[in-house]
Image: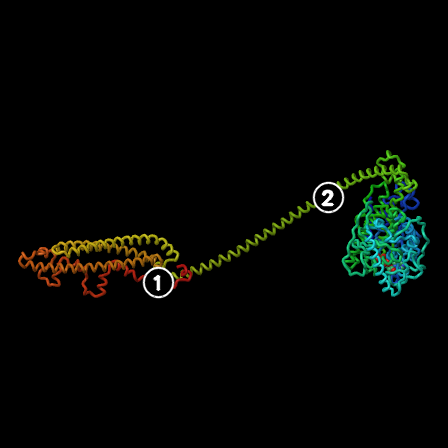
Amino acid sequence: MALPLSSPCGYPFEEEEEELPVFESTVAENGGLSRPRLPEISVISPGLDGQPPLTSQNVAAKPGDRDDRNSEKVKVFLRIRPLTDSEREKGEEQGCVMVQDEETLLLKAPQESQNMRAAERGVSQSIHKFSFSKIFGPETTQQQFYEDTMKKMVTDVLKGENRLLYTYGVTNSGKTYTIQGSGRETGLLPRALVSLFRKLQGRLYGALDLKPVMCQDVRQLSSSEIKMEEIHRDSLLKEDGNLSSRRAGTTTVWDSGIGGLSTTSFTTQPEDANTVCLEPDSLSLSGGVDLEEGVQFSIWVSFYEIYNEFLYDLLEASPSQQPRKRATLRLSDDKQGNPYVKDLTWIQVRSAEEAWRILKAGRRSQSFASTHLNLNSSRSHSVFSVRVLHVRPEAASGQAMHISELTVCDLAGSERCKEQRNGERMKEANNINTSLLTLGRCIAALRHNQNKLRPPQVVPFRDSKLTRVLQGFFCGRGTSCMVVNINPCASIYDETLQALKFSAIATQLVHGPSTKTRVAYILSLLCEPAANRDGSTVMEEEEEESDVEDGDITLLNMETLLQVIDVLKREVRRQRVEKEVLEANVREEVVSEVMVVMSDMRKGFNESLEAERAIMEERCEDRIANLQKHLKMFYSQQLQERDEEIKELSTALEQEKRKHESVPSTASPVDSEGPRRSHRLMSQAEPRLHAELDQCRAELDQCRSQLFTKTQELTKLKMQLEVPGSAGAITSAADRKLQEGQRNLQKLRLDLQRLGTDLQSGERACCRNTGGERLRHTLTAADETLAKQNQILMELQNNLTLVKADLRRKAETLAGCAQLPPTSFAAPTTPGSCKKRGGTATTPAGSENHPPQKRPFFQSLFPPRKYNTRVAEEACMTPYTRILRSRQPSPPPSPVPTPRSLRGKY
Ligand SMILES: Nc1ncnc2c1ncn2[C@@H]1O[C@H](COP(=O)(O)OP(=O)(O)OP(=O)(O)O)[C@@H](O)[C@H]1O
């Protein structure tokens, strides 16, 4: 069963404590509650599944946890900081933290704490008991603490081991104080540095003396890069020196010789939290360690922080430079699969003072801020690493034999996010808590996996940057040590309780197989026949052979080593197969889970799509309805306007009609009719009129031709009349012809009259039409032609009259001749002929010359000249002229003003 680990700053307490099997009852139940009464005191129980608690005594006897027989348990130290004066004044001292003995701590919930309220409700205990490797009270000095915690670690590192020390606790609990110290109270790290260099007296190797290949063991450096590193180191040290002098106001004197600290004191202002005093009397510098003969050492340091889940190099550039955006570092895996920080600055140091100055220079780039609990609170996890290169100078390759590392990690303090008023602080607190929670989960998973009887859990190292960089120390690359700092203030009791619960899990952790154990494991593989290895796990094999004495693998002969290689190859193959199966299972599980998630997502998307569609449809319908409504309104308004306009027009038309009716004589028929109707009639009558006009023209042409013929005949007649001797015959023929011509002319006039009538009616119909006008002009021209013809005819008649008069005179002459002897004259006209014409011989000259029968005809043809002009004109008028005259006064335009609209059209 996976351990449900609470958040380091954990809430809520009630539920977690109900489920957590970490605590077991040691006190008799209290009655009165329906549920089983919880114990008043809880103690740490490593038996996560109900097994009895692990103690140093029973661990060895437990069959399922055989790691513990050979592996050292992770050391977890507890340090309680003293209360400050101001905290005492606030009444923070309520005795809630009690040290029972060197390893046992009792926590008693204060009255105002949530834990006490939960205890009062019966869902939690009010007293908690925790065990640690060692507990350090408020009175513990820095020196004592160093001696019991880190001193051995320095020795181990010089022996080639990797060591990690990290501090954990609530904010303002004294973590930074423990690591770095304050004023004269030097912390663990400077002490460790001094101790390290002290132990390496006379054994340090210069950076430029190292071959580049050697430096590659620390970091991929070329010789030019090493020089750059030197320059950078010098600039860092110089910068720090200046700062130190400026801050302290005193001369900082360090003997950076290989011999370690000189007797010259290093003093700074005690209130300066960034400086520490490394006076020899404040440090207990123990004697040297047994180092291998002929081996030289080179010390390199690095310093980086994990801020908001990003890695920043604190030694990247000189702090005096202008502030700029910091570059983030990336994590990568080396060939062995151990994570390391890529492109991290490693600087070689030749003394503790140099290392300390570099640390101080780096601290200036570190993220600090003032919070409600701590005026100078670390907002990031800082990691300071010291790498020791073990070099054998006389070796042919000149490469480092070995590299060991001491890493000191000052974790940021857990805190309540909601108490942060600043958004940035809240984000930082959230990231800090998340990474600490991941660390807790990793430790819990490691603890779980220690029991081989249970199926292993995946350790979530990759869930945070912090656990990634520390992974190697939890996986056999070295050992770790945890320092838990607590603040005894009653106001932060609940947070302290959660931090201690977390550390309680760590106390049950054992270190993974170290390098030595691996050697033992290889040797064990050799001791066991290969054929018998079927299905058993590596760890089991290792456990079974854990009693095999550890040894140096380089001591084995060639044959054995070949055997080792074979065995290891087989083992690698087996593990590969195992891992492939595991990977396939994981992939299958992941795929099935992803499929489920995908199908859920698809379902969700479909649903949301449907909902969206419905909403869209609804909206569209609304819009369409709205549009229709507006269109309807718009068109009805338009129609209304049109109706009103029509109404106005029809009213105006009515008025016009009425006016027209009131003036009937002047109004033309066309005007009285509606404009439309007249237009229609006109368009209908136009072709007919054109046809009639054409017909008129044709008839006119015919008349003209007839007239022309008549004229020719008349000319002939005239000529004939001029011939003597035949005048009587010619005159009678001319008379006949004239009579015939008169008849024809009459007929022609009648036709013309008819045509004129037709034309008049047509012209009336289209009096205002341009076609009508044209017709009128044409007719006028025709009239003129006719008038001319008439005139010619009249002249002809006159001429004829003259001819007749001449003929008459001649006839009279002839008659006079007839009264003479008949021989002399032949009577031109017989009396009978005279009678026939109705004339008498006694008729006066003027009237006698006109034969009596012929006179009316000639009178009709030739009106007497003595008539007045008007009568003469009327007599001279042809029927067509009369028609034209009657037509000439064309109907006057209507005096009634036409409406504007109608005027435009017509
Ligand atoms: N053992 C101690 N003796 C005396 N003073 C201490 C001790 N531990 C801590 N202090 C003081 O308590 C204050 C807070 O300590 P510190 O800054 O180290 O806390 P912290 O846990 O690092 O806080 P944060 O997590 O917010 O960075 C400091 O003023 C420090 O000097």
Asked whether 432 or 524 is in front, the reply is 524
**Secondary structure under the numbered disc 1 in the rendered image:** loop
Any mark on residue 594, and which?
2
Count of picture labels: 2
Coloring scheme used:
rainbow
**CB under 8 Å between callouts 1 and 2?**
no
Instruction: Name the residue type under label 1.
Output: Pro
Residue under the point 39% across and 56% down: 676
Which residue is at the far top? 531
To which residue does mark 1 refer? Answer: 893
Q: Quadrant of the N terminus?
A: top right
Q: Residue 167's spot in the image, x, y percent?
A: 86, 53
* Residue 112 visible at all: no
Rendered view: 539 above or below 258: above
Rendered view: 515 above or below 143: above
Q: Residue 669's spot in the image, x, y percent?
A: 34, 59
Separation of marks 1 and 2 at Cα, in angstroms: 98 Å
